[in-house]
Amino acid sequence: MRFGCPVHTRSGTSYLTARGLSGADARAVIHALLTGLEGAFLLARGLRSTEPFLAIGRVVAGYVTSLPGTANAPHPPLPADRSSRPAREDSGTADLRA
């Protein structure tokens, strides 16, 4: 954690500033994303669902689109919500059931 977070924060901030966000906004987005993902990992294991990852993706995407300079930027479509579908044993979600 101590070594990975600074690297991800720097690279994520660079990526977002290159796409028009201010340095402060880019850092805030990366911090929100990393924090949200950490919580999503915990919830996904407990719920045995990928729903927490989809939720944090939607929340962070909404936050990013609310920031100055992103209103006219092209945005990729969000993934469809598939959280209501039951998990299959061979779908790659079996490791979440541990």
Image (spheres, rainbow, N blue to C red):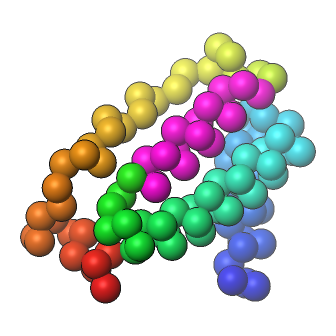
In reply to whether residue 10 is colored magenta, the answer given is: no
Establish if 94 lies above or below 77.
below
**Residue displayed at 81% across by 23% down:** 68
Quarter residue 82 falls in? top left
Asked whether residue 14 is in view, the answer is: no
- State the residue lying farthest toward the right: 24
**Residue displayed at 31% across by 35% down:** 80
**Residue displayed at 62% across by 20% down:** 73
Quadrant (top left, top right, bottom left, bottom right) of the N terminus: bottom right
> How many numbered badges does the structure rendering display?
0
Residue 97 percent location from the top left of the image: 28, 78
Quadrant (top left, top right, bottom left, bottom right) of the C terminus: bottom left
Residue 7 percent location from the top left of the image: 72, 71
Asked whether residue 81 is in view, the answer is: yes
Quarter residue 96 falls in? bottom left
Establish if 51 lies above or below 10.
above
In reply to whether residue 54 is colored magenta, the answer given is: yes
Which stretch is magenta? 52-67
Quarter residue 86 falls in? bottom left
* Residue 82 placement, left or right of 46: left
* Residue 52 placement, left or right of 98: right
* Residue 51 placement, left or right of 92: right
Establish if 14 lies above or below 6.
above
**Residue displayed at 68% across by 16% down:** 71
